[in-house]
Image: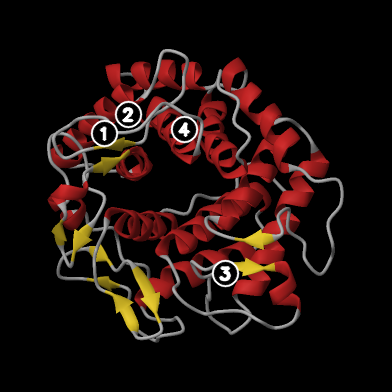
Amino acid sequence: MTPPLPVYDHLLAMSDNVGTFEHAVLDQPRRDCGYCVDDIARVAVVVAREPAPTPALNHLVDVSLSFLCGSQSPDGRVRNRRSSSGAWESDFDNGDWWGRAQWAFGTLAVRCEGDERGRVARELFIRGARVTSPYPRSVAMAVLGADELLEVEPDNAAAQMVMARAIALLDRPSLDPLWYWPEERLTYANATLAQGLFVAGFRRFNERAVRRGLDQLAWLMKRELAPGHLRVTPNTGVQRSGWRHGVTNLYDQQPIEVAALAEACARAWRLTGDEKWRRGIEAAYEWFLGRNDGQVPMFDPATGGAFDGLTAHGPNRNQGAESTLAMLATFQTASFIPQPTHGTH
């Protein structure tokens, strides 16, 4: 199978001059549910990565950066939810939305380098880097933004600080070979945890963290490819005790899990050049094309929107922002895989 190129029609239809709406009923945005930083940050990352953006996509970058700028407090924390009227509805904090905002700021700082957007995003990243978060996924996502900055600015102190804190939080002193995972439960965006560790290890010249993060990703990928196609952790999660006794649920499978695995495998490929990571990328985009437990495509080619989940009865045909962005990110990753640049570890 050949990965399709990303199509942004549905994403643009889900967006207005404030931001991108979070939820949809079929292919129509649910405006009453408003917006969230979680999704706006994803929009910024995905659109900034597009190598040939249209004027409409460039406008969406501007809208997303403005939204994210308004979400950040002077001390670097971030508020998440905003109503359809434009009013903010949540407090400033250091949860996952802070980590996603940092990912977006780092990405925009590099991909928009040379214009005002890049300068603003860099300043917002540096301010956000002052925040300490105890949440592993939040920190792992902040690592991805720091990684973007360090690619072009290796001595960036704020980004290096994010990496150092990430190793301290994400590494674990010992792991069971049968459950080679830093948590007692697989939940969501699991591959991002492993990616955060090996990327931080690479940037901090910590070979132990690199190896442990890559080994965790390999363990996860082996588990999720065991049926011969991608079967990601369902939204109900997988408990260590249940997994060891063969008790697992198959559904609902969420596109965010697929995108997280594709992202992590692409970064592992760039870092090591090991061909096994390309298999993870392929399995991820094939999941959207129908090579999954339901044997059904997980997107609507007529709209460019992805379905919100794979259930026991087929796709949930609502095309919300998170699922659509997960699909676009996966197709981007599969279509624009860079060559390894750093050699093996």
Contact between labelled residues 2 and 1, with CB atoms less than 8 Å apart:
yes
**Mark pair 4, 2: CA separation:** 10 Å
Q: Which mark is residue 279?
A: 3
Q: Position of residue 233 (x, y in %)?
A: 55, 69
Rendered location of residue 228, percent (x, y): 58, 84
Q: CA distance from mark 1 to mark 4?
A: 15 Å
Going by the numbered disc 1, the residue's amino acid type is Ser
- Of the residues shown, which amino acid type is indicated by label 2? Leu
Who is closer to the viewer here, 200 or 27? 27
Q: CA distance from mark 3 to mark 1?
A: 32 Å
Which of discs 4 and 3 lies nearer the camera? The answer is 4
Of residues 288 and 267, which is closer to you in this image?
288
In whole angstroms, how far apart are the C-alphas of marks 4 and 3? 31 Å
| Image point (43%, 66%), residue name | 254
Q: Quadrant of residue 108?
A: top left
Disc 2: which residue: 68
Q: Which of label 1 and label 4 is nearer to you? A: 4
Question: Between disc 3 and disc 1, whose residue precedes?
Answer: 1
Upstream in sequence: badge 4 or badge 2: 2
Q: Which mark is residue 98?
A: 4
Within-10-Å neighbours for mark 4: few <14, some 14–19, many 20+: many
Q: Secondary structure at mark 2?
A: helix
* Number of residues whose C-alpha sits closer than 10 Å to that of mark 2, classed few (under 14), some (14–19) or many (20 or more): many
* Amino acid type, callout 4: Trp
**Helix, strand or loop for disc 3:** helix
Q: Report which residue position mark 1 lands on.
A: 64
The answer, for residue 345, to whether it is visible in the render is: no
